[in-house]
C-alpha cells in the first residue's frame, strides 16, 4: 500500500529577510521623502497592533509619510554621522531610532502631532511583562467559563486553570488570579486575558524629537 504524504501547513507569519535591493530601495525612498516634508519626528510607541497602525497611516496619509519597523535601515537613510547626513542634521535623529520607534515625515505642525498622540489612546491586549493596573479574579464554579466550548478545556488547563468537564460544561474548580495590580503579567495570563477579551493596556505614542527642514533639531 503506497504511503501517503501528509500535507505540511505553511507558516504564514514567518517574515522573509529583506534583500539588499529592498533595503537600498527603502533608503532611497526615505532620502527622497525627507526633502518633501517640513519636519521629521521620531516617536516611540507601546502596544501598537495592526489595525491602529492602519488607522494612523490613514489619518496622516494626506500630508505625512510614516516609516516603522526598520530602524537600522532608516538610520542608514538618515545618516549616522554628519558626513553621511541625508539632509541638514538628519543624522541627529538616528540615535533615537531604537526599540519600538518610528519615523514620521510630515507637513503638520508639531503641536498637531502632539495633540493627536495625546488623544489617540485606545485599549489594547497586554503583552507579557505588562504591569497590571487592576486585579481580576476568576471565581470558581460553572458560570465563569460558560461562554467557552468544551473542546477548549484542555487548553485552559494548559494555561494554568484548574478545570474539569461536567455535562460538556467547563467548570472552574478553584478561583484563579487573572491579573494582580502592580504585578507583571505572565505569558499564560496574557493568553487568558485575550481569550476573555480583557484589554488591560493602552496604545501610547510619544514624540521623542523633531528636525525642521531648515536643520533645527529639538529633543522633546
Image: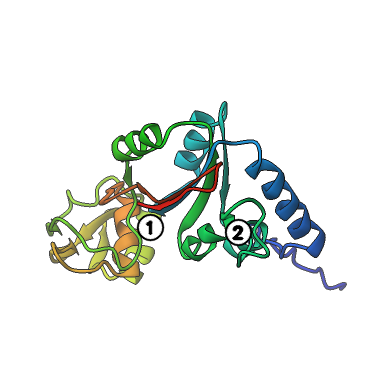
Judged by depth in the image, the label closer to the viewer, 2 or 1, is 2
Task: Classify mark 2: helix, strand or loop.
Answer: loop
Residue nearest the viewer, comparing 173 with 66: 66
Q: Are there few (<14), some (14-19), or many (20+) residues within 10 Å of tag 2?
A: some
Dot 2 and dot 1 residues touching (CB under 8 Å): no
Residue beneath label 1, please? 152
Residue visible at 32% across and 56% down?
A: 126
Residue visible at 72% across and 47% down?
A: 29
Quarter of the rendering occupied by the N terminus: bottom right
Q: Are there few (<14), some (14-19), or many (20+) residues within 10 Å of tag 1?
A: few
Q: Relative to residue 80, is residue 114 depicted above or below?
A: above
Residue 27: quadrant of the picture: bottom right
- Relative to residue 60, is residue 70 drawn left or right? right
The colour scheme of the drawn protein is: rainbow
Q: Is residue 161 visible?
A: yes
Question: Residue 70 — which label?
Answer: 2
- Relative to residue 174, is residue 170 drawn left or right? right
Task: Classify mark 1: helix, strand or loop.
Answer: helix
Residue visible at 67% across and 57% down?
A: 77
Q: CA distance from mark 2 to mark 1?
A: 38 Å
Which is more N-terminal, label 1 or label 2?
2
Residue 158: quadrant of the picture: bottom left
Residue 199, given in percent of the width and then of the height, sits at 28, 48
Residue 192, given in percent of the width and then of the height, sits at 31, 59
Residue nearest the viewer, comparing 6 with 124: 124
Residue nearest the viewer, comparing 15 with 219: 219
Residue 137, given in percent of the width and then of the height, sits at 13, 58
Residue 83, given in percent of the width and then of the height, sits at 67, 65
Amino acid at each position: 500500500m503506497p504511503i501517503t504524504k501528509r500535507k505540511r501547513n505553511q507558516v504564514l507569519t514567518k517574515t522573509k529577510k529583506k534583500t539588499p535591493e529592498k533595503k537600498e530601495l527603502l533608503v532611497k525612498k526615505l532620502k527622497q521623502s525627507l526633502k518633501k516634508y517640513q519636519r521629521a519626528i521620531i516617536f516611540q510607541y507601546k502596544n501598537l497592533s495592526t489595525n491602529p497602525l492602519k488607522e494612523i497611516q490613514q489619518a496622516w496619509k494626506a500630508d505625512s509619510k510614516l516609516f516603522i519597523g526598520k530602524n537600522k535601515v532608516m538610520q542608514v537613510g538618515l545618516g549616522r554621522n554628519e558626513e553621511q547626513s541625508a539632509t541638514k542634521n538628519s543624522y541627529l535623529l538616528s540615535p533615537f531610532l531604537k526599540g519600538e520607534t518610528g519615523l514620521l515625515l510630515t507637513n503638520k505642525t508639531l503641536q498637531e502631532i502632539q495633540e493627536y498622540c495625546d488623544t489617540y489612546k485606545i485599549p489594547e491586549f497586554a503583552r507579557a511583562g505588562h504591569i497590571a493596573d487592576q486585579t481580576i479574579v476568576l471565581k470558581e464554579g460553572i458560570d465563569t467559563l460558560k461562554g467557552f466550548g468544551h473542546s477548549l478545556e484542555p487548553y485552559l488547563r494548559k494555561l494554568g486553570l484548574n478545570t474539569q468537564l461536567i455535562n460538556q460544561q467547563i467548570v472552574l474548580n478553584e478561583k484563579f488570579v487573572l491579573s494582580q495590580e502592580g504585578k507583571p503579567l505572565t505569558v499564560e495570563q496574557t493568553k487568558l486575558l485575550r481569550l476573555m477579551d480583557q484589554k488591560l493596556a493602552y496604545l501610547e505614542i510619544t514624540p521623542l524629537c523633531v528636525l525642521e527642514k531648515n536643520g533645527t533639531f529639538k529633543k522633546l
